[in-house]
Image (cartoon, helix red, strand yellow):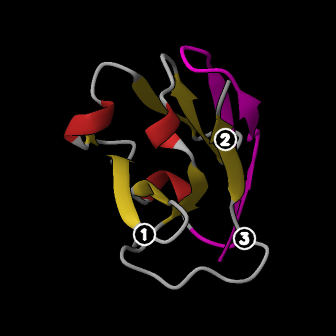
């Protein structure tokens, strides 16, 4: 199982970023994809989930509802997290995973920094 995140960066408050997750080594279209994040000094937290191809349902933590949108492209084994109206409290390392909770590996994830 391999999931590789990309697309993070520095953005001003109110800005947008689109994160990508490239997946391989498992039955992607049958798997729930989860986005999680960890801010400095804080615990890992679940952000959102997108369920398998047959459900297509999504679920978000309250603090990102209406601002974040999760999607997937099963033909490309890709998942995406569109993040709009970003706030400083969204600053964190973002991960895509098929299990939660999990222990991030060194170098895993993509850093999102929201700052003016």
Q: In this figure, which residue is indicated by the disc labeled 3?
A: 108
Mark 1 sits on what residue? Answer: 42
Residue at the limit of the structure toward the front, as seen here:
116
How far, Cα to Cα, is label 2 from label 3? Answer: 16 Å
Q: Is residue 14 magenta?
A: yes
What residue is disc 2 on? 113
Say if 25 sits above or below 110 in the image. below
Rendering coords of residue 99 (x, y %): 41, 74
Mark 1 or 2, nearer chain start: 1
Q: In the image, 110: left or right of 101?
A: right
Mark 1 vs 3: CB contact within 8 A:
no
Percent across and percent down for residue 27 are: 55, 65
Query: Cα distance, mark 1 to mark 2?
Result: 15 Å
Q: In this view of the protein, can residue 57 be seen by the observer?
A: no
Q: Nearer the viewer, residue 116 or 60?
A: 116
Local secondary structure at mark 1:
loop
Start and end of the magenta stretch?
A: 1-26
Q: Residue at x 66, y 26 (%)?
A: 17
């Amino acid at each position: 199982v391999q999931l590789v995140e990309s697309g993070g960066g520095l953005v001003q408050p109110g800005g947008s970023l689109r994160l990508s997750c490239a997946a391989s080594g498992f039955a992607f279209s049958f798997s729930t994809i989860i986005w999680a994040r960890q801010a400095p000094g804080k615990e890992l937290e679940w952000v959102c989930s997108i369920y398998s191809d047959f459900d297509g349902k999504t679920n978000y933590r309250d603090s990102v509802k209406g601002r974040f949108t999760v999607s997937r492209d099963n033909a490309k084994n890709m998942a995406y997290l569109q993040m709009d109206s970003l706030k400083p409290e969204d600053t964190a390392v973002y991960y895509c995973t098929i299990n939660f909770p999990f222990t991030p590996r060194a170098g895993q994830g993509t850093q999102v920094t929201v700052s003016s």
